[in-house]
Image (cartoon, rainbow, N blue to C red):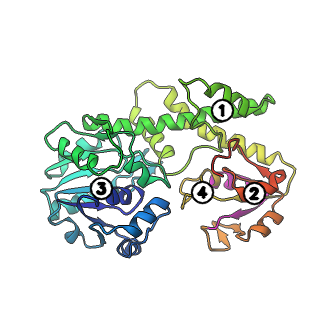
Amino acid sequence: MKICVVGIGYVGLANALMLCKNYEVTMLDIDSSRVDKINQRQSPIKDQMIEEYLADTNNLIYATLDKENAYSGCDYIIIATPTNYNENTQCFDTKSIEKVMDDIVKFNKNAVVIIKSTIPIGYTRFLKTIFSVKDIIFCPEFLREGSALYDNLYPSRIIIGSKERDASKIAEIFTSSVSKKDVPVLFMNSEEAESVKLFSNTYLAMRVGFFNELDMFAQKNNLNTQDVISGVCADPRIGNYYNNPSFGYGGYCLPKDSKQLLSNFKDIPNALIQAIVQTNDLRKKFIIQEILSKEVDTVGFYRLIMKHESDNFRNSVMLDLIDEIQKYKKIFIYEPLISDVCYNGYIVENNFNDFINKSELIVVNRMDKQLLPYKDKIYTSDIYTSDI
């Protein structure tokens, strides 16, 4: 059996490495540098398990820029291309998926297409009306950035967005490739599977927003945030997890998925889903006011990434804070992922000691052990320092 995975990102690469234990896997991408790295057994993304696995594997996996070569002869084609949220249309931009589907129809319409990209509710059914292939099935992913391969090998559940004839075979492909035993497999129609993805991430965004609002209440009433959270989360129905206050939720999934879900609601009555989207903006405004209230002239922003071991800062809350703070304070950015001395017009100081010395106040979303000696300069919402 041959499988093609389109898109060398977290989702695509994690799936390809998991599946290549049992199947011949070809990866397709438009980025030649990513293709070259895969063929040199180097990871193009930061994920320790992916890096180690790719370096050690002798399994059948290679990457290519050649669409015809990638698609021809494949039994299954997994689409894992990005679908960013478009603020103007208030919907995911699915053009990359449709472009892939055009090529699949051209080169291999007998393949079963499995969509791993996050999509609007109802999108799979829409694709089936305009593209003639053997089948199109949505199978959502629930991966954490920096732990993508681990989450793929040890999934909490496998969801197959179909109850038709190909569904059980796809389930077998995934269950035979994971390392975890007895993974729950749920079969459902495509709209339900699409809903599971968006509601799951919106619930996680809700937890972030809830504990951030708890933190704001505690700060304004001179309460100990950690004591309150510890007491609340001691209730097993609530649980002591995903409860560390932050500057807001950001990254690949939560902002765009919660907005897409709200868009899918349209005229359906809702209050909570709107609030989950709105609370993130309220949190950022609160943090901005707290920083501006400090009697300092220079503010240093330690890392643009949202969490430890991330290798990007797309949709980072830190960037939103910087955009506002720079109107009133002189700012510096410490971000080793940026090699230039300037980023979007902001000064980058990647000599750590110089950054510390120049910054009267250091803003950090998640604490790092190298910052511990400078606690008197730190402004953070991180009370558990779980990333250290």
Observer-nearest of 131 and 2 = 2
**Which secondary structure lies at badge 2?**
helix
**Which secondary structure lies at badge 4?**
loop
On screen, residue 230 above or below 97: above
Q: CA distance from mark 1 to mark 4?
A: 22 Å
Q: CA distance from mark 1 to mark 2?
A: 26 Å
On screen, residue 81 above or below 216: below
Question: Any magenta on residue 220?
Answer: no
Which label is found at residue 320?
Answer: none
**Which secondary structure lies at badge 3?**
strand
Label 4: which residue? 305
Q: The disc labelled 4 sits on which kind of residue?
A: Ile
Q: From the viewer's perspective, is 116 left or right of 169?
A: right
Q: CA distance from mark 2 to mark 4?
A: 16 Å
Q: Is residue 38 visible?
A: yes
First in sequence, mark 3 or 4: give its number: 3
Please rate how many residues cluster around mark 2, counting C-alpha atoms within 10 Å: few if below 14, some from 14 to 19, many from 20.
some
Q: Is residue 328 visible?
A: no
Q: The disc labelled 1 sits on which kind of residue?
A: Glu
Residue 337, position as x, y percentages in the image: 60, 67
Label 1: which residue? 213
- Where residue 240 sits, quadrant-wise, is top right
First in sequence, mark 1 or 4: give its number: 1
Q: CA distance from mark 1 to mark 3?
A: 37 Å
Residue 265, position as x, y percentages in the image: 40, 32
Residue 191, position as x, y percentages in the image: 29, 36
Observer-nearest of 170 and 22 = 22
Label 2: which residue? 371
Residue 165, position as x, y percentages in the image: 13, 41
Q: The disc labelled 2 sits on which kind of residue?
A: Leu
Q: CA distance from mark 3 to mark 4?
A: 26 Å
